Amino acid sequence: MQRINIGDAAATVGITPKMIRHYESLGLIPEAERTEAGYRLYGEREIAMLRFIRQARSLGFSMEQIGALMSLWNDPDRHSSDVKQVALEQLAGLEQRQKELDLMRGTLQGLVARCRGDASAHCAILQTLADAPASLPAGHGRAIKALKEVRPGERRPQRAPRAARALADAPVSAHAALSAWSRSFSQAAA
């Protein structure tokens, strides 16, 4: 395969040129070779790396996890147990998010069931949302911080290694905060 430009590489892999530049800026792929005119060129190795990233993203792996997986992929002395550990952590995260989504769906189904959905102005959904408890669930501030971690145009701050983070307080995910908020409706209705 000859070297191809960023647009062709993006089309080959099924991502946008902007994402390729983003992955390059994060160090997930090496800085591209450039033509005399400054155009990026990609070969088979880079295309394989981009496909790897796309597949990992489709499974919900974070950029940090993808970086770890790519390091393992490129390490001939790797242990499959290390790869499995990253995948198990992702699976646990997906299962937790699914539980939280199920709880939110159940709450919303209950709200929809209580709304008459007729021509009257009264709506049980709006009333329940308006009557939400004023007190915020424990960890709500951390959840808001998690929601605001990355704003458009900003780079995500570098994170400590996984082992160091495990020793620190685990931040509450935005899903956890929403789940706690959902539970407050269920408890209020009971």
Image: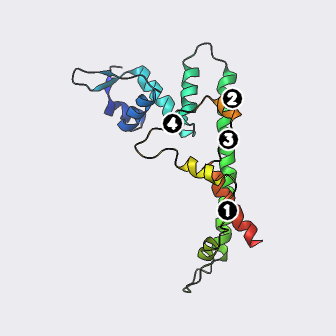
> Depth check: 125 or 10 in front?
125
The earlier-in-sequence mark between 1 and 3 is 3
Q: Quadrant of residue 113?
A: bottom right
Q: Secondary structure at mark 1?
A: helix
The earlier-in-sequence mark between 2 and 4 is 2
Circle 3: residue type: Ala
Give the CA distance from mark 4 to mark 3.
16 Å
Q: Secondary structure at mark 3?
A: loop
* 38 left or right, relative to 15: left
* 30 left or right, relative to 125: left
Give the CA distance from mark 1 to mark 4.
30 Å
Question: Where residue 65 appears, x then y in whole percent?
Answer: 58, 32
Badge nearest the viewer, 1 or 4: 4
Q: Which mark is residue 170?
A: 3
Circle 4: residue type: Pro
Q: Secondary structure at mark 2?
A: helix
Give the CA distance from mark 1 to mark 2.
31 Å
The earlier-in-sequence mark between 2 and 3 is 2
The residue at which mark 1 appears reads as 182
Badge nearest the viewer, 1 or 3: 3
The earlier-in-sequence mark between 4 and 3 is 4
Badge nearest the viewer, 2 or 3: 3
Q: Quadrant of residue 69?
A: top right
* 163 left or right, relative to 72: right
* 75 left or right, relative to 135: left
Q: Which mark is residue 85?
A: 2
Give the CA distance from mark 1 to mark 3.
21 Å
Q: How many marks?
A: 4
